[in-house]
Amino acid sequence: MKRLSFLILSLMVVLAACSDDNQERELSAYEEEVIDYFQEVALGFEFGGATEITRKWSGSMKIYVGGTLSTEMLTELKSIIDEINGLASDGFSIEYPVDSIDANYYLFLGTGDQYADLYPSQANLVGSNFGLFSIYWDGNNNLNRGHMYVDLERASAQAQLHLLREELTQSLGLGRDSDRYIESIFQSTWTENNAYADIDRDLIRLLYHPDVTTGLNATEVETVLMEILKEE
């Protein structure tokens, strides 16, 4: 009887352990906020009426910088690139510097009028925007080229650093602004913050996670992000 009782007790312990292993971890309140914010920022863009699905670079973003160059802006650019490359885990990276012939992304530092001369489609936007970006994608929603500008005439030195980070980061496929987090680089109201909030870093690393593909709508990406976060 003692041996039988011991075996039953052992079996109960094993079953309880299996039950605990199979029980899915619930997301924390912060992780739920990350998913909500991802859906708000990463699906679609502010201009152009693009379908609200995920888009991301499949290959390297190769940046060529033109216009009026300064040590401060180029140093900041290198810092931003290092941060982004450190967050991506799907093989994506930003390459800088590259020759203009090899570039697929042009970063212009100058005035709005100069930028509009280069890209006439932006002429009606530069008047009210000290920074802008435009990106393009293929039939599979893989981003493959783009350009941006930072206004060096109207924006203060601190604002220039902020705009450099904001427009480049949005060019990754995180294209929408939000008024939700004042410290976020995606904040829709005017700020001059030039650092990522923790939730910004999470959005970048999740978009460039191997399990996040292009073409996902809000419902589909929610499922994928939940699985990623539960496994971490």
Image: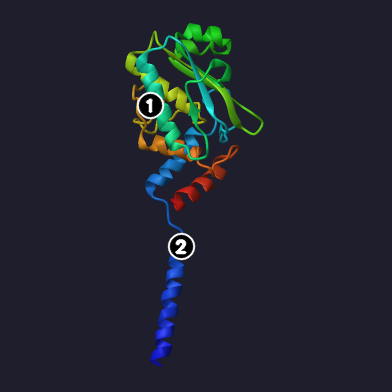
Residue at (41% x, 42% y) in the render: 33
Say if mark 1 contacts mark 2, CB within 8 Å: no
Q: Position of residue 23 (x, y in %)?
A: 46, 62
Which colouring convention does the figure follow? rainbow
Q: Which mark is residue 79?
A: 1
Q: Position of residue 58 (x, y in %)?
A: 57, 33
Q: Secondary structure at mark 2?
A: loop
| In this view, the mark in front (1 or 2) | 1
Q: In the figure, residue 166 lies in which quadrant?
A: top left
Amino acid type of the residue tagged 2 in the rendering:
Gln
Q: Is residue 10 above or below residue 130?
A: below
Residue at (43% x, 66% y) in the render: 20
Provide the residue designation for mark 2.
Answer: 23
Horizontal side, residue 211 vs residue 23: left or right: right
Residue at (52% x, 39% y) in the render: 90
Horizontal side, residue 10 vs residue 121: left or right: left
Q: In the figure, residue 201 lies in which quadrant?
A: top left
Viewer-proximal residue among 135 and 99: 99
Q: Residue pushed farthest bottom? A: 1
Q: Which mark is residue 228?
A: none
Q: Estimate how packed mark 2 is, as few (under 14), some (14 to 19) or many (20 or more) residues with alpha carbons within 10 Å.
A: few
Q: Secondary structure at mark 1?
A: helix
Dot placed on the residue nearer the N-terminal end, 1 or 2: 2
Amino acid type of the residue tagged 1 in the rendering:
Ser
Viewer-proximal residue among 170 and 35: 170
Q: Position of residue 218 (x, y in %)?
A: 54, 40
